[in-house]
Amino acid sequence: MRIAVAVKQILDPEGITVNRRRERIFINREERIINPADKCALEAALRLKDAHGAEVIALSLGRPSADDALREALALGADQAVLISDKALAGIDAPTAAVVLARAIERLAPCDLVLVGQTAADTGGDQTAGRLAELLGLPQVLHAVTLSLDGERLKVVRLWDGRPIMVAVAPPALIAVSPLAPPARYPHGARILNAYRQMGVSVWTAGDLGFTAEELRPNIESRGQVFPPERELGNVIEGAPEQMAGEILALLRQRRLI
Amino acid sequence: MDFTLPKEYELLRRMIRDFARQEVAPLAKRIDIEEEVPREIIRKAAELGMMGVPFPQEYGGMGAGELGYCILMEEIGRVCTSTATVIGAHTGIGAMAIYLDGTPEQKKKYLTPLARGEKIAAFALTEANAGSDAAAIRTRAVRDGDDFILTGSKMFITNGPIADIVSVMAVTDPSLGPRGGITAFIVEMDWKGCSVGKVEDKMGIRGSGTSELVFDEVRVPKENILGQFGAGFVTFMKTLDVGRVSLGAACLGGAQAALERSIQWAKARSQFGKAIVHNQSIQWMIANMATEIEALRSLVYRTAWMVDTGQPFTRYAAMCKLYGSEVASRCISQAVQIYGALGYSRDLEIERMFRDARIAEIFEGTNEIQRIVIASDIMRQEGVRISP
Amino acid sequence: MDLDFLQSLMGGEEMAAAEAAYQDIWVVGEVSGEGLTPATRALLGKARDMANALGVYVKGILFGAQEAAGSEMISYGADTVYLLEGVGLGSFAVEPYVEALARQIESGRPEIVLFNATSFGGELAPRLAARFRAPLFTHCIDLGVDEALRALLATVPRLGGEYYEILVSPTLRPQFATVEPGVLPAPFADPYRYGSVEHVSYDDLPPARVEVLGPFPEGLPEPPLSRSRVIVCVGRGVGDEEGVELARRLAERLGGRLAGTRGALDEGWISEEQLIGMAGQTVRPALYIACGAAGAIQHMLGIARTECLIAINTDPKAEIFPYADLGVVADAKAVLEALNAALAGGS
């Protein structure tokens, strides 16, 4: 079985704070990590590898620093790593990124499964999975939590509007793994060292994949940032329990917490 | 001059830090109260290669050298000194003696399972009458045919209660004294005659078992002589030397934890209408701690680099241990002060860290001995031999 | 004037563009037991506003023979509703639904296609966007139009909603967007609005490739406290075991977990693993409801990164109130009872 896993390197959101009053975003700690949902996807692939044997290929479309993300993937147990990186690819928009990734995946030897994280923790983007599935002509299972191979088919527990259901699909297929799926294992220390010292990461450029600069031009623009209002703290109310319960529920609804 | 850590070590640090924070830290309080580092934690650590960090991969180790080992000890020391001590005695001196002076056969037979964490090691030198005066040990190993009969007892041995394999220093020729009269042996604790004696009830690192080891006419085959016959003194000096660097790293972790907690508290605690971090006295305490920690960090990692690049490091290793233990004690004591009465409460971790830190100035060679080592090394370069 | 002269005046490209223009705003609707989902209604209201600004039509899309829902779409602002029917469109499956909608979009050429950001919308929108090489803005919390560019302005959340970004696609069409349910205002229905409901039949739709086996009864394992989105915390002020049980039930109803302060631990109401604070766990939930907790610093340090803190305490001077988004001076147990009752009532 061959499994391709697309991972994205992001700035750790834990190191970023948003000051609503000053309407500014501060990067307190600049650390790059593998997007958590992508790491869950990697773990799902590795569990299939442990149980049934598989070749796991990690790909990443990103800056040169994404090499570290791929080394981490190798340390976790991936067999091969491909970095798609090029000055020409800097600043491409999400739709184009999906096209580039799809072409890279097609360039690999045929895969039985393509795994990606459902959501990017930095941008909140969650359309790459569906786009990839369409471009690659694959059936899709989104918001996957657990995967298991049952004969020829893959059985997946996935969330549908927050509720877990079971589905089955025959490979080849694309699975988008939820950040609520089991987190990745710890990489073995020796594998960490070997991932850097002995293993290699192939690097593909936009040219290698046959893209022209024109094709990579971004089509989506930003019109700026909007900041939610500052939290208003210290608002105290008093009254009968039923009335208080009503106020609490109103706040929860307003904040979309229920 | 490039001071950046190579990428693989950054990832290694991140893995160990995550492991320490998620797997070890939540258990630290219980480890202290129940006086045991759970086998489960040791197993999990071993599965990730953490019980043999500095040893080559061909012997089941991680292949990360002294640098990787210091990173491990710093990150574990940050969350639980007891766990760091268990690993430290096992890797840093117990198995290390075999790595430094063992034959390829001994390394294959003993170092490999130790590096993999399948067995636990200890280093047995100290006796009731031989602490700083290590040469005064009396445990005897008498030749009997091809074997040696080992009789005596060792005291204050870290990992004593749980060790499977012990590097033991014994007198093989009383007439020769330390130079030529002491030999190191690899002893398996399940051999007839080996037993664990009194287990110490300690102020701190209560999760690390410290005990007496009793050897009652234990038959040790000649294949288990560690290093050169009669040159045990050299073996144990070499081992203790390098062990000091990682002990400094563990102290660095403890000091760092004290600083972080102090900062957290200073930000949160308000008195007289403002967070106490706005008081100069607190600012100075934080600045002093941070400065000492930076100095210690540079010292430890530079010394680790010296070890890994084959340079002489004895003096610097002693400095790591001396300065590290004192910085850790100062920082943790300062943290208690910053926390005030809460720092004295057993509800929080600060008081445990305070109790745990004290031993570092005493074991692995007291700080007084470290000072002698440093001065002797300096004076040797000046052509003066300090009399013992 | 003949066409050739016109063309030479306007330039060939513009003529071609005029012929192939994308126009109208489409809303792909969802239906629940009582007709259109509230999110779909809100989407229609917004679409109507935008269509008025652009001077175009609103068209609704429903799958299956949903006459009543179709009429409802008209009353909420649609001018035309297409009911897509065919073999395979009975219950949701990606392949036939995407194909049918794609064909409809190809023939209808909408400039904007809106979905709810539900699983339904999330399954369809990305595939359609890829098929049309079109932009897609997901989880929008607001929509607007740039009238000069005739473009959709989409406000999307970043960093889990800590801030938002406004995105626009100046040229690519159609523009797809999924909108977060519950963010747009509830619109008014006008039962006298005029519009048409058309049945559109599709044959030869591809079969589904994913089989739905059924609900997963065991449910998912509970995340640890440190990763829980909702936490209900009990302090001494919750009074007794009954109060703790009410808190536990509320936590369950809200899809969260029970936790407690040192006081609760000392009373034996919670276990050590449930302790929040300096001596226990540090948590960062989206919602933290503190029942009968005073707000001692040891506790507060454990919840510094809570997004929404609600505190219930009988003491109006409780230390916790200055840190709460909402402070309620009342008996915690009584409020818990009322909350449970209100939620059980299905409101």
Image: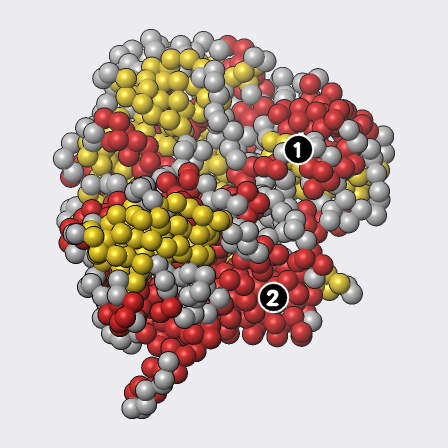
- Residue at image point 48% right, 49% down: B198
Q: Position of residue B289 (x, y in %)?
A: 55, 71
Q: Position of residue C27 (x, y in %)?
A: 47, 26
Q: For the residue marked with disc 1, what is the amino acid? A: Ile
Numbered disc 1: what chain?
Answer: C
Nearer mark to the viewer, of 1 and 2: 2
Q: Position of residue B35 (x, y in %)?
A: 53, 45
Q: Compared to C32, does B186 lie above or below?
A: below
| Distance from the alpha carbon under mark 1 to that under mark 2 | 32 Å
As drawn, the label of residue B199 is none
- Residue at image point 36% right, 62% down: B138
- Residue at image point 55% right, 30% down: C181
Q: For the residue marked with disc 2, what is the amino acid? A: Ser
Question: Which quadrant of the figure contains the N terminus of chain B?
Answer: bottom left
Q: Position of residue B119 (x, y in %)?
A: 31, 44
Q: Which residue is mark 1?
A: C270
Q: Which residue is mark 2?
A: B333
User: Tag 2, which secondary structure?
Assistant: helix
